[in-house]
Amino acid sequence: MNYLRQLDGLRALSVAAVAWSHWSVFWFPTSFIPWAEFGVETFFVISGFLITGILLDNRFAMSKPLVLKQFYARRFLRIFPLFYATLLVAFIFQAGSVSQTWYWHAGYLSNVYFYIWGWQGQLSHFWSLAVEEQFYLFWPLLMIFLPGRWLLPAILAGIGIAPLFETAMDSFYPGHSPQVSAHVLMPSCMDALGMGALLSYGVRNQFPMKRLTLILLLVGSFGCALWSFSTTFKPIGRLAEDCILGWLVYSAAAGFRGPFGWFLECPPMNYLGKISYGLYIIHNFAVSICASLILLCGNPTWLAKLYDIPVLRVLAFAGLTIGLAACSWHIFEKPINNLKRKFPYPRDAATLSPVS
């Protein structure tokens, strides 16, 4: 896929929504907007859109085993180093109960652990990273090896199965913690991941995308009005949200015009989107890091008083997160990421040709 600047801006907004959901409790005790849900679901739609595009573009550009090799090597270089480095640092400094549960996170089974036993503080956001990795393990096999005529049914089946799976799991095999639903399990997230995949498939098969995404927007808006505030139909309400996010992601990929398009493409948003993986991994540790830094400074009264001001506290979290993520990108992630050149895709694979 060609580089799409507005999607980086959308990534920046998504990670900001997730971070705000974790930091806003220090400012506003309650929030009626599920910021974390919107942010993570947007990440999933973007991931499904881009990953499916890469796989479809390359399924006939080289041998199928080679496609998988290149795909997994490139994913390994982008995802594993920072994730395992963060997990190691968390283990050394005894963040939460990581010393007892590290092997769940190391095996990308954080979401399964949380569903069974409940959230684990600073590592709670690892559930979505586990979902992404589980998606990366099985989705390429379908997109590469399925016959072309089965691709669309497989994508639609994934979207349709997600709310049914979540409802069944919560009804018949609920976890021990009422705060965590089966939505953290990978099959439950296939509505968002599959929505992105559907858009990617549609682009390559000359679907009337403007009409399709407008229908998604209308259906999603109607569905949210009916179900988004219902606990009984929460999975259906989330599917409606994903329809709206599908319109949003495709519109950003095609390019918004006007002020919003300019905002998504402006250099600060573009940069934050580029380092969004580091932002996401680091942001939930910002609270404890700030507290530790204040103690290292001797906990001066003037600093403690400033830290007690909600807006300054949230700004400190944001500044620390951005600073650490920027250092991680330039010093650690980018040099490793540059090794992707050793695992290239064919140059002509970026053409959006019909899938057969």
Image (tube, rainbow, N blue to C red):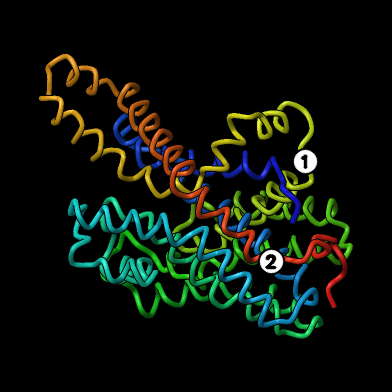
Q: Residue at x 66, y 45 (%)?
A: 7
Residue 52 numbered mark, or none: 2
Q: Quadrant of residue 308?
A: top left
Distance Cα–Cα, label 2 vs label 1: 19 Å
Residue on which the image places disc 1: 255
Q: Quadrant of residue 205?
A: bottom right
x and y percent of residue 221 in the render? 66, 49
In the image, taking residue 312 as reference, residue 271 lies left or right, namely right
Q: Amino acid at mark 2?
A: Thr
Q: Amino acid at mark 1?
A: Gly
Identify which residue, 223 or 155, lies in the foreground. 155
Q: Residues within 10 Å of mark 1 (few under 14, many from 20)?
A: some
Q: Residue at x 37, y 45 (%)?
A: 282
Q: Residue at x 48, y 38 (%)?
A: 16
Identify which residue, 47 or 190, lies in the foreground. 47
Quarter in which the C terminus is drawn: bottom right
Decide: is 62 above or below 251. below
Q: Residue at x 39, y 29 (%)?
A: 319
Quarter in which the N terminus is drawn: bottom right
